Amino acid sequence: MSVIRFPQLAHKEREDENPAIQIFGRRFYKDQTETEYLIEFLLLFLAQKYISNPEAKWGFGFPDQVSIENWPDNTPLEYEPPARLILKLFSFLGSSKLETRHGCHKERFRHTLENLKARTETDYTISKDQVLDLLEQLLCGFVGVAANRTWCTQTFLPVSRGLIAGETIWKRIKGNKKPDTSWEEAIKGGYYSFSSHDFMARGGELLYLQLCNLIRFLDTSELLAFEKKWDFQKGDVKASLTDIAEGLKKFFQETSQIDKLSKWIEDTDPTTQDLIANQRQLAKCGWCPVESWQEAYLFAYEFANICRATIDPLEKVEMLTLCCVFQVLRSLCAQSVRYCTAMTDETRQQGGANGFAWLVTPPMLDDVSLRETAKQNLIRMQEIIHGALRHPDITVPNNYNYKKADEQGQELFVKLGKKIGLIAPWKGPGARIVITDVILRYLVLALIPPRSKMTLKTFEDRMFCHYGMAVSGSQLDRAVRWTYPRQLLRFPDTQKNWLEKSLLSTGFLIPLSDAVSQVQNPFGQFLAL
């Protein structure tokens, strides 16, 4: 396959036989939840990491441009994700399923409670047990992903550094065979896996690598041409990368009190921390397509705007999660448009910055013809992804079953879209791309810099540039031509006011006159001149 990789890692025969990995990178996976894309991205962003020299590690942020430009071939990015096993044990064991609790887990939980009691001081109005119960309930309130997982596989919402942890898998079958195994023996004997990539499947790492890859293109003619074509200012991307680092630094400073609580609980059991440090392996990242710098440019712009927004920490986590999921969706579409042989250059020109068009409608739509076209637009997008996975240059074994490829291609696109409310209905026929109030709020925060304004027309242009989202006018015509490249169809502009009404009802629209309105992002510290 002709996809050039960043970093340039060798083809792994068993893993890379999947066409979805060959095209999209290693890897977007069907079982990775929306929150875990952000958790994994932040985990890598915050962790100690290195490219080729373990003595030359760096922590917070991205590598410098010189290091990226001199990245050796066949050298993955490696990093040290914290396990925070005792914190998870204290927070999640009590709410986990009984059959997932091994004897050594329960014994260590009792041991941890006794140690925490010994370190707790209270007055006569509340007991130590009550204090610990309140702490457990508080931390349970920050659960990010629980579902039916074992306590150690659950995750926290990434609202502070101290709650961000790598994946830990308890090998339940192995543990059940030896019910008398002690806590220390379980860690030493490999009953825990700290580097499986089962649920944190490298999707967040891939997004981080896309931004590292973007740094390689700073000041290049390709990037300058991209900025000029899509009306970005020269230097916007450098400012975005700086704003991401500064915004996340400020965010984690504001939530640092939670870090102190996390550290106080973890420090109760230094023996466990030492055992894990001796057993665990460094996590190794995969790769992303070199061409993905274009969608990474847009991702950096959006991520930076949300990082700068002065919103509640929990809402910021929600918006950053949406930003990561939208980038996964955009990456699937952009790469598929590049490699689907059924796509022509003329059709690509009808789309946004990445060559695709999403015909978006309100959740409630009476126009039957437009609703049918929106439905066909989603089908067309799925067909493009399906076709790209079957590119003639992809190398697959004889009689290859494309089930896994499709799961990580068009099926992943629809699944994630439905999870965030971008695709509706959840079940049944007639699925199409819609804009809910939550997604509209995200688009305002992501596409408009904090405390800035732009005309409604400019906002619609930004939606089309970043996501190929077409609402009305010429962009709607282009989305229709993208959907039906062999037909000449045009819709009367009967739906042009729905987006304006939605923005007005959510407080983001400032009507200046009957003909002109402005969309504002009020969540910032200063007014743009």
Image (tube, rainbow, N blue to C red):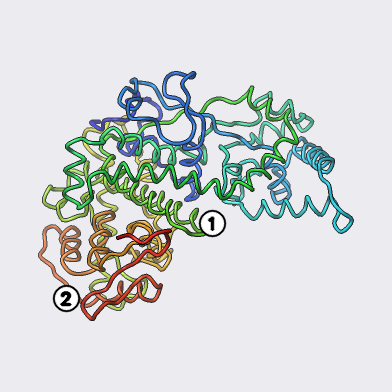
Which of the 4 quarters of the picture holds residue 105? top right
Horizontal side of 171 relative to 44 (left or right) equals right
Q: Is residue 1 above or below residue 340?
A: above
Residue 492, labelled with which disc? 2
Q: Which residue lies at the image location 50% right of the left edge and 58% below the top edge?
A: 315
Which of the 4 quarters of the picture holds residue 265? top right
Residue receiving disc 1: 314
Q: Is residue 424 above or below residue 259?
A: below
Q: Nearer the viewer, residue 18 or 473?
A: 473
Along the polypeptide, which appears first: circle 2 or circle 1?
Answer: 1
How many dots with numbers? Answer: 2
SS at circle 1: helix
Q: Which residue lies at the image location 75% right of the left edge and 36% below the top edge?
A: 268
Q: Nearer the viewer, residue 529 or 402?
A: 529
Instruction: Please tell me whether mark 2 or mark 1 is closer to you in this view.
Output: 1
Q: Is residue 435 above or below residue 317?
A: below
SS at circle 2: loop
Quadrant of the frame with the N terminus: top left
Could you tell me the amino acid type at mark 2? Pro
Query: Label 2: how many residues lie within 10 Å, few (<14), some (14-19) or many (20+)?
Result: few
Q: Which residue lies at the image location 77% right of the left edge and 33% below the top edge?
A: 179
Query: x and y percent of residue 399 in the render?
Result: 32, 34
View extreme (right): residue: 124
Residue 254 seen anywhere in this rendered image of the structure? yes
Query: x and y percent of residue 423 in the render?
Result: 37, 61
Could you tell me the amino acid type at mark 1? Leu
Which of the 4 quarters of the picture holds residue 118? top right
Q: Which residue lies at the image location 29% right of the left edge and 77% below the top edge?
A: 511
Horizontal side of 34 relative to 255 (left or right) equals left
